[in-house]
Amino acid sequence: MSDEFDKTFDIEDDELADNPTKRVPVCLCLDTSSSMGGSPIYELNEGVRLFYNEINDDEVAKSAADVCIVTFGSGGVSNVQDFQSIDGEVAPSFHAGGDTPMGAGITLALNLLEKRKQEYKDNGTEYFQPWLVLITDGAPTDDISQAASKTSQMARDKKLTIFPLAVEGADMDTLRRISPVRQPIKLQGMKFKEFFQWLSKSISVVSHSKPGETISLPSNDGWATL
């Protein structure tokens, strides 16, 4: 085992041990394929930047939010950011290009979520039901069967909350396969910033609650369309 691996593992352990706040694990699974070029990728970058800022403005949420970012498209499938607190962090920047390996992207996101949940358990860290935020404007160019089967089962078993956001051009049937419990929502135009503002407020609501407590998320008026 390398010294670098030991150091990374120790940092993760220290972060969980030093911050006893109940965690809200959120994985952003983002489409960065060529069809997202131009305004979509620009607005996505602006939205994620706003999301970081909004979380950091909430004293409870910035300690509770545990954020991971996976992209599928430009550069293939990438773990842009592993689960970590974004307290004081600067949002990453994304570039559009390539195909849409959505199935592989979701599979990586689920694997990272399972790994993080085990780390919570190993460190005695309480956590809320994980969130998978999937944003896409197209159809997958790979097989999503296994990924969709797993997300569907986890959602039905209440082990995962999925927020599928459809940008103009997204394959709604595919998104319904991935998320049969919470139906996909279409984004109004390029209102990424409004969506991420809603997401940060939703995380804030959850972080101020207790695990298992019934909560009401903010209204999606202003960014969602039927």
Image: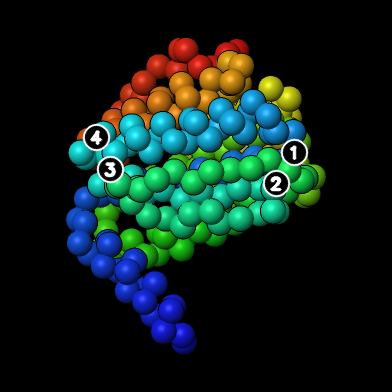
Which amino acid does the dot numbered 2 rest on? Gly
Inter-mark Cα distance, 3 to 2:
29 Å
Q: Residue 110's image quarter?
A: bottom right
- Among the two numbered marks 3 and 1 on one chain, the one whose residue lies closer to the N terminus: 1
Quarter holding residue 126: bottom left
Residue 208 appears in the figure: yes
- Give percent across and percent down for residue 177: 68, 37
Q: Which residue is mark 1?
A: 34
Marks 4 and 1, how far apart in space? 34 Å
- Closer-to-camera residue (39/19): 39
Can you identify the residue that label 3 sits on?
62
Asked if marks 3 and 4 touch (Cβ < 8 Å), the reply is yes
Mark 4 or mark 1, which has the lower sequence index?
1
Q: Cα distance, mark 3 to mark 1?
A: 32 Å
Secondary structure found at label 4:
loop
Task: Say which quadrant the C terminus sits in.
Answer: top right
